[in-house]
Amino acid sequence: MTRRRVQLGWRFWLVTVAAVAGVAATAALGRWQLDRAAQKQALQSAIDERMAQPALDGRALARLETPEAREAVMHRAVVLRGRWLAQHTVFLDNRQMRGRQGFVAVTPLQLEHSAVVVAVQRGWVPRNFQDRSALPPIATPEGTVELSGRVAPAPARLLEFEAGGVNPLGASRIRQNLDLDAFRAETGVPLATLTVLQTQAGNDGLLREWPVFSAGVDKHHGYAFQWFGLSGLIAILYVWFQLVRRFFRPHGHAAP
């Protein structure tokens, strides 16, 4: 195998420019994914730190007046005392737990010694597939109750086919999504703009195996690996086909 003088044509330079651009673009995308991973890792660390802090009480939640203050306590543990407003319980449809379809029950809780009401995502219950309009039986204690949970945003929104989010069951308490502003206007209660995921066990027939918060750091690391791998593959193919086979080939073989 000897090195021979080869005249370089326009195709060689075109492939070279394309390869350099491909390596630069894929490497930049890999670095961008690493930056996203670092941001998500910082978010995950902040959430983990909040979850390890002492539990808030109802008075602390009632004092949250700005979006920044509410965001600062998101995912923190809480211990609340108050009274269920069972007449305003709603059931969010098409919610999964343990791979099964059912409802997430949401009941407003009137905080003790406060005018503030917090929507509590109390737990999951299977639905009656033979009668889709049937409300599942759940126990809602009367009087003052105490519950533990963690601060959460409004329940995740699912796709709605009805224009304007109209409840397909009319006045039924079964609905696809829960808009806190609309729910506040509907019920007339001073509902807070955050919710609480109830975590403590109870005898109310509800399942509370809530998913653990994950910022998705591993996903971005995986994407970065793919982009850097593609960058390396482009470089290797370029070196092999444009350099090794062109400049270091046996005598008598034509240049590709």
Image (cartoon, grey):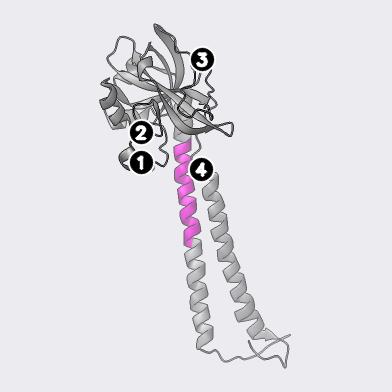
Secondary element at image label 2: loop
Residue tagged 1: 162
For the residues bearing labels 3 and 4, Cβ distance under 8 angstroms:
no
Residue 167 is marked as: 2
Res. 101 in view: yes
Residue 204 - label: 3
Q: Nearer the viewer, mark 3 or mark 1?
A: 1
Q: Amino acid at mark 2?
A: Asn
Which region is colored magenta?
Answer: 28-44
Give the left or right position of residue 119, taking residue 255 as reference. Answer: left
Disc 4 residue crowd, few under 14, some 14–19, many 20+, Cα 10 Å: some
The prevailing secondary structure element of the residues shown in magenta is: helix
Q: Earlier in the sequence, mark 3 or mark 1?
A: 1
* Image quadrant containing the C terminus: bottom right
Quadrant (top left, top right, bottom left, bottom right) of the N terminus: bottom right
Q: Residue at x 52, y 74 (%)?
A: 19
Q: Residue sitting at 25 percent across and 21 percent down?
A: 188
The amino acid pointed to by label 1 is Glu
Residue 135: horizontal and vertical position, in percent? 46, 22
Whether pointer 4 and pointer 1 mark residues with C-beta atoms closer than 8 Å, the reply is: no
The residue at which mark 4 appears reads as 216
* Quarter of the view holding residue 43: top left
Name the one closer to the observer, 173 or 88. Answer: 173
- Asked whether the residues under the numbered discs 2 and 1 touch, taking CB atoms below 8 Å apart as contact, a structural biologist would say yes
Earlier-in-chain disc, 3 versus 4? 3
Whether residue 62 is situated above or below residue 216 in the rendered picture: above
